Amino acid sequence: MTALTLEPPTNMLVTNTIRTFTDENTGREIRQLTDMEHGAHLSYFRYFKQLPGGKMLAYAKHAQGNVIILDPESGEVVRIPHTFHALKVREIDGHIWFIRTAADTSKNRSDRRYSRELWSINLTSAAVTEPRLVAAIPDDVPGEVEDITIDGKHVILRESHQDLKAYPIPTTKDVQSINHYFSRPRKGAIWSFHVETGQANKIFESEGHCPLHIDTSPADPGLIRFCRDMIETQGQRIWTVRIDGSDLHAIRPQERGEMVTHEFWWADPNYIGYTYQDRRQDPTVLTHHWAEYAMAQTRLGISDLSGREVFLSDPINCYHSHLYMSPDGRFVSGEGTHDHSYVYAAAFDWRNTKLDLIPLATIHTDYVPFRGQGVDCNFSADGRWLIYADKIGGSKVHQLYAVETEL
């Protein structure tokens, strides 16, 4: 299949003057890509967002919706006149499956953040800009819509039973608050819904944990990767399962005290990346659950789909949260944390376990333990730019910035 050129409607084009400035700590030139009234962000780091022609899907509330298309090279911004949450972006042709957010649907239910209508839109020169309704998921199908397979045939839903009001997600380094959060009673399941037949099947279920970070493969429509919501050092975190519920197996089997987390599909989707810390000899492992403040060093790990680890970097440091890679796998990015607030990049080579992560730009957003800074850095399609979100100059909202990946 030949990738198409992305040409959204010109009447939604925003004249965007890129502001450049020198980073006060790294000395590198930073390019401000957005200046949106309500801010802008790229969405969570592991979500697909590359579009044809080097463009990227981003989110920014505007008068017509909440979605924009960003050109990291020119800074051109195109507003898309719809409000939605993208489930999957098929990067080769710009086809997107999405569900509308509550603000854009008459079926807003108090117990749901999103609607249960599946839509698709193709943001290319060959397509109509109006979205198409694909399916309405019946209310008797359990769970919330999480993802869709890359062929568009199966919607994936996550069922969870928990009380996050009584057991709120912690945002401090208070041990009692995080232990209270992880002590909450919970159970969950993963369901598939076949778009053409309307058949729903339970793929996986768990007691004492909820499935989380559910991501279908960008290459194999029958494969799902997910994690278990748990203290990462206390059990097996990452798993894969087939769409029919078969072949459930662990990715990078863990010993107690090993931390494997922040998983993502590698540039070659036959592999899965993650961060790793060895805390088996750490006396604070049962009371100190924050990887970014641990004594153990962070490392980049990669496993094949059988679960076997095929790459483990040398120790990087003890404070990185998310590690990610460029679309071609040539570079790795890193997000620092509390007292190391930078976005980093390093050249990647399968034959070299040393990752020389170099700070490229300062992050000015306050760091929140267990929640991060909303940086969500990603590379442009050609790997030239590292794009990230930050609050600079006293801003209350994130804008998008780019720094050249010159190492």
Image: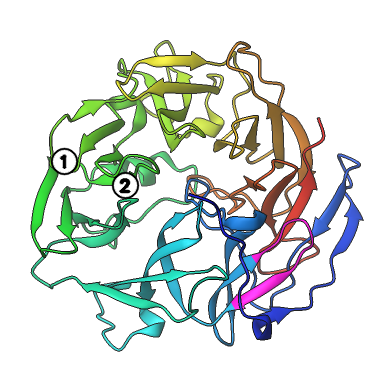
Give the answer, above or below, for where 258 lies relative to 149: above
Q: Which residue is mark 2?
A: 214
Give the answer, above or below, for where 172 lies relative to 89: above
The main secondary structure of the magenta stretch is: loop
Other residues around mark 2 within 10 Å, as few (<14) / some (14–19) / many (≥20)? many
Going 63% across and 70% down the picture, which residue do you hit?
A: 7
- Secondary structure found at label 2: strand
Judge left or right: residue 359 versus residue 201.
right
Magenta stretch in the rendered image = 70-79
Q: Amino acid at mark 2?
A: Ile
Q: Which residue is mark 1?
A: 208
The answer to whether the residue labelled 2 contacts the one labelled 1, judged by CB atoms less than 8 Å apart, is no
Give the answer, above or below, for where 406 lies relative to 191: above
Going 62% across and 80% down the picture, which residue do you hit?
A: 9
Q: Amino acid at mark 1?
A: Gly
Residue furthest front in the image = 1
Q: How is the image coloured?
A: rainbow
Q: Nearer the viewer, residue 209 or 165?
A: 209
Residue 161 in view (yes/no) = no
Give the answer, above or below, for where 344 lies relative to 161: above
Judge left or right: residue 265 versus residue 137.
right
Q: Which quadrant, please, contains the C terminus?
A: top right
| Distance (Cα) linking label 2 and label 1 | 18 Å
Residue 147 x/y as whole percent: 32, 55
